[in-house]
Image (cartoon, grey):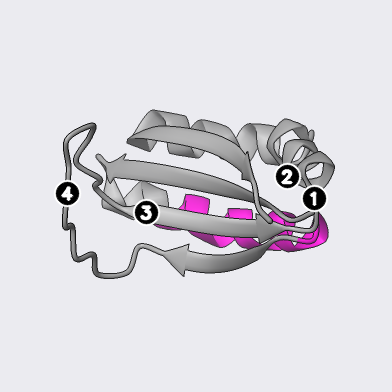
Amino acid sequence: MSAFIIVDTDIQNPTEYEAYKRLTKPIVEKYGGVYRVRGGAMDIRQSELWMPTRIVIVEFPDRKSAQAFVDSKEYEPVKLLRINNAKCTLFIVDGD
């Protein structure tokens, strides 16, 4: 069963965040991840719970692969770029 990492990001420092995006992509791919959405235009039709900022959706073969990516040693220093240059919500959800 596929699993998805969904991230809503409010980028605070766009220049530094570009380095995060560049460094993250090969790590995502190493764990079988495929970007499905990466900050595209949104048509928000309802926002009672939260107002999304910039959505990223990455599909992984399964939950174990998604968790392995998030918890990986190679992602750990790159994740600090995100934490230091953006505010975000990140979660893993199972697909069908």
Mark 4 → mark 2, Cα distance in angstroms: 28 Å
What segment carries the magenta color? 18-32
Q: Is residue 33 above or below residue 8?
A: below
Q: Are the residues flagged by discs 1 and 2 in contact, CB closer than 8 Å? A: yes
- Asked if residue 72 lies in the magenta stretch, the reply is no
Mark 3 → mark 1, Cα distance in angstroms: 20 Å
Residue 17, position as x, y percentages in the image = 39, 49
Residue 79, position as x, y percentages in the image = 57, 36
Q: Mark 1 points at which residue?
A: 62
Q: In this view, does 12 lie above or below 22?
A: above
For the N terminus, give its image quadrant: bottom right
Please name the residue shown 53% across and 31% down the image.
80
Say whether residue 87 is left or right of residue 35: left
- N-terminal-most mark, 4 or 2: 4
Q: Name the residue under label 4.
A: 46
Please name the residue shown 27% across and 41% down the image.
10
Q: What residue type is labelled 4?
A: Gln
Mark 4 → mark 1, Cα distance in angstroms: 29 Å
Mark 4 → mark 3, Cα distance in angstroms: 15 Å
Q: What residue type is labelled 1?
A: Asp
Which is closer to the viewer, label 4 or label 3? 4
For the C terminus, give its image quadrant: bottom right
Say whether residue 37 is left or right of residue 73: left
- N-terminal-most mark, 4 or 1: 4
Q: Mark 2 points at which residue?
A: 66
Mark linked to residue 55: 3
